[in-house]
Image (cartoon, coloured by chain):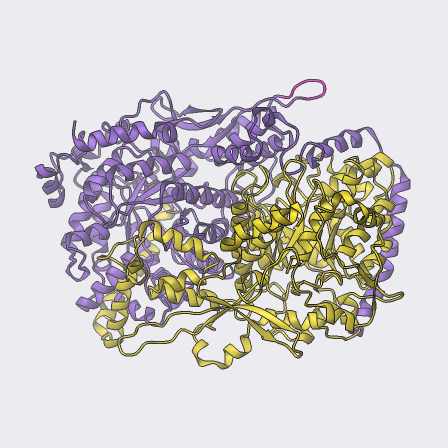
Chain colours: A yellow, B purple
Amino acid sequence: MSAIANEFIQQTTRLSNEVTQPFPNSRKVYVQGSRPDVQVPMREVTLTATHGTQADEENPPVFLYDTSGPYTDPGVPIDLLAGLPALRTPWITERGDTEQLAAPSSHFGRRRQDDAALNHLRFEHLRTPRRAAAGQNVTQLHYARAGIVTPEMEYCAIRENLRLDELRRDPRYARLLRQHRGQSFGAALPETITPAFVRDEVARGRAIIPANINHPELEPMIIGRNFRVKINTNIGNSAVTSSIADEVEKMVWSARWGGDTLMDLSTGKNIHETREWILRNAPMPIGTVPIYQALEKVEGRPEELTWELFRDTLIEQAEQGVDYFTIHAGVLLRYVPLTADRLTGIVSRGGSIMAKWCLAHHQENFLYTHFEETCEILKAYDVAFSLGDGLRPGSIADANDAAQFAELETLGDLTRIAWQHDVQVMIEGPGHVPLQMIKENMDKELADCFEAPFYTLGPLITDIAPAYDHITSGIGAANIGWYGTAMLCYVTPKEHLGLPTKEDVRDGIVTYKIAAHAADLAKGLPGAQVRDNALSKARFEFRWDDQFNLSLDPERAREFHDQTMPHESHKVAHFCSMCGPHFCAMRITQDVRDYAEKHRLDDLEIAIAEGMKEKAQEFVQEGARIYQEV
Amino acid sequence: MSAIANEFIQQTTRLSNEVTQPFPNSRKVYVQGSRPDVQVPMREVTLTATHGTQADEENPPVFLYDTSGPYTDPGVPIDLLAGLPALRTPWITERGDTEQLAAPSSHFGRRRQDDAALNHLRFEHLRTPRRAAAGQNVTQLHYARAGIVTPEMEYCAIRENLRLDELRRDPRYARLLRQHRGQSFGAALPETITPAFVRDEVARGRAIIPANINHPELEPMIIGRNFRVKINTNIGNSAVTSSIADEVEKMVWSARWGGDTLMDLSTGKNIHETREWILRNAPMPIGTVPIYQALEKVEGRPEELTWELFRDTLIEQAEQGVDYFTIHAGVLLRYVPLTADRLTGIVSRGGSIMAKWCLAHHQENFLYTHFEETCEILKAYDVAFSLGDGLRPGSIADANDAAQFAELETLGDLTRIAWQHDVQVMIEGPGHVPLQMIKENMDKELADCFEAPFYTLGPLITDIAPAYDHITSGIGAANIGWYGTAMLCYVTPKEHLGLPTKEDVRDGIVTYKIAAHAADLAKGLPGAQVRDNALSKARFEFRWDDQFNLSLDPERAREFHDQTMPHESHKVAHFCSMCGPHFCAMRITQDVRDYAEKHRLDDLEIAIAEGMKEKAQEFVQEGARIYQEV
């Protein structure tokens, strides 16, 4: 057993309670699709009954979108050394358009594989890579445009619906399904999401399903403005701190709290091996910024980067199973001077690397000039583009400026080119933007990039709160999600200050789950309000445990409650520590409700009230006169 | 020395570091008005120079709105036993329209004063109350309508401006004063706030200056949509936990982090004495919900409440110096049945008490039928109305319903009546409201209540995140503040779960300072962006200490940074732990900037770029055709 393996086993053991225990009163259920091997996981939260004066009222279970993967299913043994089950392998092989390679086709991939010094670090069950057969295109976009509904598409449809159709037929859910009309700003949210709808949204580029054929462990998910708003989390080692085990831990932790996708932004040692461990154990799509690793290969000297080196890195990562690449192909040489007068210049790492390369060589960005060759590579593995906003503003002062919007227009041009190759695309967005300037970003992205999914970092709506930037950005994220952003890249409290701990990751994710859910409610996503309604009903009825169990963070909700009211008896108490036992608004309200149902109001009170109202009316003119005097 | 006194002295000693130490690199400065006793405090943050290649560039000091009172001024000795200096006493006496009473005029006030058993609890330097002389009206609204600019008004004008005029004349601030145009939704924000503008806004009821003549320790502040958005914090003991010293501690803590006003919501023991200690040491306006104490006086039995008891409580509190009263006079008998079908009924404590009273007696709310008598009392002390939204929604499901909006219309009627008595008014708002329904609340309030300042609790934009409701509500607060809300009532992480600790108060306040500032930026408040610009400049130039010192929470920003980079040398390091020493976007950007300034782009790159762009254009039709196929 290798050193790293030992490390992992200790790690898993140490983490088992924290990371692998199911959520309270929850169990993982699987909804089967049109074929037995389409098994879509959901989290079912069981609730207690409401104690009525006559009979008890049953509270039906609530189904939640579940990103946690097999880690919260006691029925699935977790073995990080073996990796997750490869559930998509039959779907991929059946299509008969791929070939299994004998070895990695990237030079770097082969070199790492042949390096005995890395044995102690290496994931032990390596598969040889799979690639599109000659002349084939294996992207979900290609299948969709051919009219094919893949198992991945059906999986996403079932996952998005959360059994909504069944709930609609079940009278127990009638009250819970009541929902306010949304304001969708042009999003077209269907009452029910069908596999055909998923296919059509993917076909027109308005949604993507990041699903590399070399990442068969993936539980497919969809990113698009007409689906649930998703959140991305970032992990990754750096030259300052570095441990493979820590990164895998953070990945599982991210899945637990609700991360829909995850980017490995490692810039430190053993990036290749770290990524392998993450991918083999990741139920969610994994993204990277390949230029980071390319830069490591030239010891951090941007001017030494070449297309050939970058190309080899793309193939290396695509054959490991990375599902989407952030590529800063919109940082054009002529845009760089537009940033010279900025308060905070270029703050995107990828953007600044490419800007430096362009100026050092006095040539156009090679990611731009070789964009079509990049498309050829991505379509052979179904890696999606995340077109990077290398010129995003790093401060409120620089928001929505010429550099940012010039790049956005170029990303629109590149989107068209990628689509011509049937390669899936999403567009990255800012950054730092004050509230009143956020919508312009969304509107311009929809127009310039033809509704390709927008994927934004925040935006942070002020610069003055380092240590609270999960909140400054969560406010911007909720708004831009409402306006139409498909996926929100989370920000942790450590943004601008340091590397996030596991607790920072948790705070960042929960903040972004709030933003994403608020956006779903605001857009009017069918069924989005069920969880709010169920939790509020539990709250109003003093079903404390149900309230905790339905919340985004049951552990912390319970912990906070217990700080002032630790005893189990308080979990059924019809009061809380805010008001104490003799004085509770909610209890009084229930008395009021009983009373109101018994009595009818006669005309007396209405007369009293109306009399007062008329008296008030007299002061309209009176009041107006007074203002004029001033 | 009494027991409580001892307790306080220990308390202050224990707190001195945490609560009374000045912020790093900051000093309290005072701007004098038209008379020597108008001394308006501000926090001046001194910054380090920017090290340039040739010469160093000076970074001028930044002036911040300072709510912390004398507690952060090392020049002012703090003695909780003596209370704060009564800076407004000369202003009040000069007006010659008040009389000093020989004793409290409320029965309850006298009873408490004569009760020897309370000696050990009592604040030791009691003043006898002051009241308007017969026939006089001592409200700021009354003076404003008479065309008078009071010292309080001038104080507010100077405080809001933060020396903006001087900064505009100082070339060192030219870059820092650059700001994006705001979207004000009808707010009329002047370039400079003059005392006359303050008077006019108060005169037309669009702003209030809560300033009871019995709270001369107060540092005047103004609440209105054409001024900085303010935040309110809540403290208060309850039957479950109770300590006078703790509450005073929390008040000072609240002032330190930026609370503009504070409500004492005590419902436990010794409410009267607790309030006295708070008021005598409070630099900010203090609000209460008098019905809470009235209910205590009838052992928590709402049906036993009477107008006479309530009236005595108003006088008791007004003579102690409470600056604004939340009064739920809009909960009309005929509105109560409108809440019967709600998911969460009536969640406002005051609202549920009055609803219960109305139904128990089958009569109209006595707060409504005695509203004019209440106005007579409030104008004799200049207590402002905070018209309570007793029927606010307690869940997303109940947002913007008939009960809520019926009450809001009644609050508009009551506003007119209060204005006829020259009594200042603000209007309380929800609650739980999804993002897309927030603006309707603001628009309706402006219309129905004639632009009287709106004062909202959040709103929370989802119900599913107990333990994170400072964030769910902070998102709603930023939005409604942008739309025109004048003051945001904070929510802590303990909302719905328990009583906030000091750390919860800090988290809640900083979250709301973020929301309020984001709203100022979004509305385009002149000068609002200076702090963002200065902090971002410091961040970009790796002036770590300056970045920390300009942030809303310098202590936590530094603490987070030091978790990964503890050494002092790192405070000047041109990199941080996110990227490590060999790879930093910002450093690279500065290289880029130097380079960009040296070189001019020739036509070559533009040709390359344009060529690629044309190629992209070809795919417009191409792309369109492909979509149609699907």
> Residue furthest toward the top?
B55
Q: Is residue A51 above or below residue A503?
A: below
Q: Main secondary structure of the magenta part?
A: loop
Residue found at x 54% / y 56%: A257
Q: Is residue B328 above or below residue B268?
A: below
Q: Residue at x 36, y 69 (%)?
A: B342
Q: Please state which of residues B578 and B136 is positioned toward the viewer in this rendering.
A: B578
The residues colored magenta run: B52-57
Residues A597 and A495: in front is: A495
* Picture mark count: 0
Q: Quadrant of residue B623?
A: bottom right
Describe residue A491's horizontal placement relative to residue B232 as left or right.
right
- Quarter of the picture holding the N terminus of chain B: top left
Please state the horizontal and vertical placement of residue B607, each as a whole percent of the image.
Answer: 90, 45
- Where is B117 relative to A330, above or below? above
Give left or right: position of A424 versus B618.
left
Residue A613 in the figure: left or right of residue A68: left
Residue B56 sits inside the magenta stretch: yes
Q: Identify the image quadrant of residue A49.
A: bottom left
Quarter of the image with the C terminus of chain B in it:
bottom right
Residue B152: x %, y % from top left: 34, 33
Assess whether residue A437 is covered by the magenta stretch: no
Instruction: From the viewer's side, name the closer residue of B90 and B336.
Output: B336
Q: Is residue B398 above or below residue B119?
A: below
* Residue farthest to the front, as pictured: A1
Q: Would you say residue B18 is visible in this rendering?
A: yes
**Viewer-proximal residue, A415 or B127?**
A415
